[in-house]
Image (cartoon, rainbow, N blue to C red):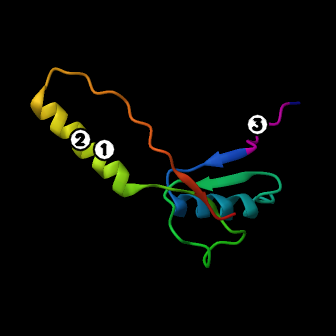
Amino acid sequence: RHNPRPDAIYTSGDFLAMGCVEELEAQGFSVPGDVSVVGGSGLNLEKYSHPQLTCCAQPYEEIGAELIKMILGLLEAPSQKLPGVIIPMSWVGG
């Protein structure tokens, strides 16, 4: 009565997403027709992936710069709480 199959799967890495696509297709599912799959590392894998993998392009330089700011802030004021930081990313591919 209840179909537990997800509509979409997000993975933390693009290679994990490619493995997920491979297994879904082996189980008879259509990707992206039945299930959408998104990778999270933003690697350029389009020549290795069919259908073309949708992924998040992580802004690693901005992430690193914010991390350094946080570390320096902790060194200056160890008891101060650090605020969360939202860094926009973009979508790549599929």
Residue 69, disc: 2
Is mark 1 in CB contact (under 8 Å) with mark 2? yes
Q: Residue furthest right?
A: 1
**Which three-letter amino acid code belongs to the residue tagged 1?**
Glu
Vertical relation: 76 (above or below) 23? above
Q: Identify the secondary structure beneath mark 2.
A: helix
**Which three-letter amino acid code belongs to the residue tagged 2?**
Lys
Q: Quadrant of residue 50?
A: bottom right
Give the residue at x 65% y 47%: 9
Q: Residue furthest bottom?
A: 47
**Which three-letter amino acid code belongs to the residue tagged 3?**
Pro
Q: Identify the secondary structure beneath mark 3.
A: loop
Q: Which residues are magenta?
A: 2-7
**Relative horizontal placement of residue 2, taking residue 23 as reference (left or right):** right
Inspect the magenta stretch and tell me whether residue 40 lies in it: no
Residue, disc 3: 4
Q: Identify the secondary structure beneath mark 1.
A: helix
